[in-house]
Amino acid sequence: MYVPMDTEILISPEVEVTSALGQSYLVHELIHAHQVVSGAARRAPCPGWLEGEAYRVQASYLRARGFTEDAFELEILGLLQGSCAQAYHPELILQ
């Protein structure tokens, strides 16, 4: 988890950070850190949008390393998390 107040990322000791899957969790949390620092977290249409984006980037990281099944599951989770009851705002998507 990313803790904005402490600008700290906490990873469970059960996560093997030397594996691609473990590193993907770090990537996910780095996206959250970027969302806060860049101001995207304040402009997001809903909190789920932030999670959705983090899952999409995490999935992309895994897909690039050949973990297509894990990537697909995270993409689906990102779609579910990222749906907002409000209108879509493409200008909020981080590059």
Image (spheres, rainbow, N blue to C red):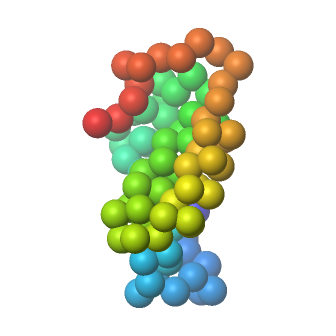
Give left or right: position of 71 versus 90. right
Any part of residue 89 in sight: yes
Spot occupied by residue 84 in the image (x, y as percentages of width and height): 66, 25
Judging depth in this view, the residue of 57 and 4 nearest the camera is 57
Question: Is any part of residue 27 visible from this angle?
Answer: no
Above or below 33: residue 70: below
User: Relative to 8, does residue 85 appear above or below in the rendering?
Assistant: above
* Horizontal relation, residue 63 to residue 14: left or right: left
Residue drawn where x is 65% and y is 49% of the image: 77
* Residue found farthest to the top: 87
Identity of the residue drawn at 36% across and 71% down:
65
Image quadrant holding the C terminus, namely top left
Most extreme residue toward the left, as rendered?
A: 95
* Above-or-below relation of 17 to 87: below
Residue at 55% x, 74% y: name it.
11
Q: Position of residue 62 (x, y in %)?
A: 43, 65
Where residue 85 sits in the image (x, y, percent)?
Answer: 70, 19
Q: Quadrant of the N terminus?
A: bottom right
- Is 28 in front, or is 32? 28
Res 10 quadrant in image: bottom right
